[in-house]
Image (cartoon, grey):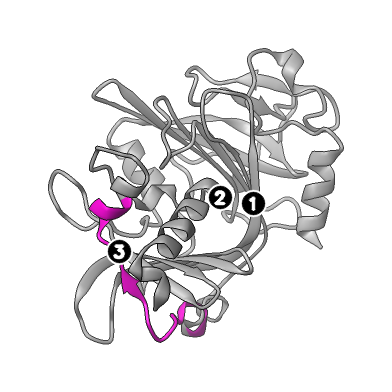
Amino acid sequence: MALFFLFAAQAAGKTCLYECVSDSDCRGCGSGDGVCKGALPTTRICLNDKADPPADPKRLPAAVPWPLVWAGDMYSLDYPDQSNKTQVNSGRFYYDWPNMRQKQDFGGKALIYISEDNKTGVKHSRFYFVFGPVCAYVHTEDPLTHMDITVTRPDWMTVCADLGAGAYVGREQVEGEWVDHYNCSVTYNGETDSFQTWHSLGMGNTPFGLPVALSAGDSTPSWEKPRLNSIWYSNVTVGADVAPAAVFKLPRICIPIPGVDLLEHLGLRTAKSLHTAFTRESTRTSIAEFLQDTQFGSA
């Protein structure tokens, strides 16, 4: 039901967390007109920045860390490239930090990321693509250090703040909830990656500290990372029972895909990591075609 209301809100012309150039692009964000805010192209979006936010609770130096185990419905909006075209996805997100795993469940498709196998004690980072009966995976590692890229840690915004790259943006409203908004922007080799997070102040239906929305921007978008991605979370629940082991159960047979083969199939010459791409519908479609076109699809 919550996802229905999110879809209805977008169809009605609401613009919060959409890209913008000026305040005129943000009409319909909140009960009035929103504001276009953000110092960088990777952070400039429409916000419901009301004039009289509540003074309490006091804001914290950094965003509240994610719960160690949580799940929530998600609605995702992507700007894949430099154009204004968009892509949307919806499903349910599961996060289980103690067992180093997370899942994006899109119904007939699922993306499962596992960074450690507690049964065998063998550490690894694998991103699994599950398309109906077909299951394949890639080993995700940093192309330079060859170290495994793990599931995002729950205190990632605190780490960013400690490194001097994080900042408090303001107190706003997202989907009717009062939230605190934080930003983390990092520039490396001429490329800027920005991450923004909104956690609840506990003044509505969502308890304090729970994630309400997330945004990511990249100054050099490619097939594996959109220029801008905004995600709304709803029906968030916490506790070990909300992400049980059964949620992450894999098909009996999952076939490894050599990353170099997949990159070649997609016409790429770089060794960029794959795992950040897998919220993208275009990427999932390309991988499905890859599985059908090779021996991997016959298993």
Please name the residue that numbered disc 1 is placed on: 89
Horizontal side, residue 253 vs residue 216: left or right? left
**The residue under label 2 is which amino acid type?**
Glu
Question: Residues under labels 1 and 3: Cα distance?
Answer: 25 Å
The mark closer to the camera, 1 or 3, is 3
- Marks 2/1 in contact by CB < 8 Å: the verdict is yes
Q: Nearer the viewer, residue 166 or 25?
A: 25
Residue drawn at x 46%, y 83% is 245
Please name the residue that numbered disc 3 is placed on: 257
Image vertical order of residue 201 relative to residue 166, above or below: below
Question: Residues under labels 2 and 3: Cα distance?
Answer: 19 Å
What kind of element bears circle 2?
helix
**The residue under label 3 is which amino acid type?**
Ile
Disc 2 or 3, which lies upstream in sequence?
3
Could you tell me if residue 58 is visible in this image? no
The mark closer to the camera, 2 or 3, is 3
